[in-house]
Amino acid sequence: KSVKICVLTYPTYEGLCYPIEEIISGCKKHRIPVLVDEAHGAHLILNRDGPKSSLALGADVVVQSFHKTMPAMTQTACLHFSKHSILSPEQEERILWYLKSLQTSSPSYVLMASIDHMLEIVENEGFRKMEALVDLLNAFYQNVMNLNSIKVHRFDQMDPTKIILFVPNAYYESGIWDGRILAQKLRDEHMIEAEYDSKSIVLLMTSICTTSEDIIKLGEALHILDRENMSTMENKLSAGKGVNYKRIYDQISEEDTYVYSAFATIYMKKEEVDVAKSVGFISAAYVIPYPPGIPILVPGERIKGQTTELFPESLVKIQIVKEDKINEI
Ligand SMILES: Cc1ncc(COP(=O)(O)O)c(C=O)c1O
């Protein structure tokens, strides 16, 4: 009874969606109005096969930033009241009161004209342009599926117009390649500007104004950078720099290393040893360098020399299961 409103962000900045319809209908059952920050989803309505706008899924109030994903000038965000809103007239009035208090009393005709122009594009060619974009993107995703040092991940409920490039663990951790370098190379060498980059991901945006030339150029650039990076990596590894995760993982098998389940080690006695002397013992700890947050070692696993090669330099001591020492593996 104390819940006044449910506020959701959908899709996320990266284009990830989730079963918002279920959340909305759950709220409706309890007469809780739903407000959705759909800043990154003004274009969803145009994609018949992609995730739906929350406005079509029963949300009561939806805020969209046209300028983020549609051809409209910056500062053209819009607040929609659903026709089926369960807001009381008082609640609606209060929202409008806040808007009046916060907004300028001199609306910009330039910005309103920009919205009109966008709506004209949407009405006349929006669906056709989106369909063409989705076709281009499907071909693009096929084309870049088998790259080695750049992965283009797709998730079940994802806005296809957002492209998330991942730099896989092996390349990223070996210190040769990361998302920042990838974004910089896309900019400097291929004149492609990423929306966002971090060490592990690069986010690219497309829209109904993206052309087939743009998508082809991006595909070619990723193939060139992948080839270039693979040969840099091979050179560095042959010069003894960098860690080849794949080579090491290939030498470590579950039969070799699995002794106890992680759960079983909870009840065992433990002690700490120097990492340098830990080979042959059974780990009682996780080693999970972050990012990317993928375990290198788990409790119950026999520590092999190769595994310790992957440990971060800062790790000097490790917890092991007590009284279980073997001489050599
Ligand atoms: C989820 C989300 N909501 C709202 C905003 C702000 O939108 P606006 O540009 O319309 O102020 C942003 C980003 O800038 C955002 O990521």
Image: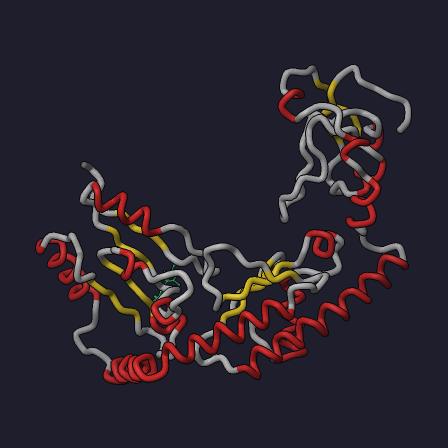
Q: Which image quadrant shows ligand 1?
A: bottom left
Up-down: is 7 above or below 305?
below
Q: Is residue 166 left or right of residue 133?
A: right
Residue at the image position 42 percent from the left and 64 percent from the top: 50
Residue 178 is situated, as x and y percent measured from the top left of the image, at 67, 60
Quadrant (top left, top right, bottom left, bottom right) of the C terminus = top right
Q: Would you identify the image quadrant in which residue 97 lies? A: bottom left
Nearer to us in this view, 60 or 138: 138
Report the colour scheme: secondary structure
Q: Would you identify the image quadrant in which residue 108 lies? A: bottom left
Which residue is situated farthest in the left direction here? 89
Quadrant (top left, top right, bottom left, bottom right) of the N terminus = top left
Residue 67 is situated, as x and y percent measured from the top left of the image, at 37, 73
Up-down: is 176 above or below 269?
below
Q: Would you identify the image quadrant in which residue 278 lies? A: top right
Residue at the image position 78 percent from the left and 49 percent from the top: 245
Residue at the image position 51 percent from the left and 74 percent from the top: 135
Residue at the image position 83 percent from the left and 19 percent from the top: 325
Residue 93 is situated, as x and y percent measured from the top left of the image, at 11, 59
Q: Is residue 189 left or right of residue 8?
A: right
Query: How many labels sit on residues?
Result: 0
Up-down: is 164 above or below 259?
below
Residue 224 is situated, as x and y percent measured from the top left of the image, at 72, 74
Q: Is residue 154 left or right of residue 84?
A: right
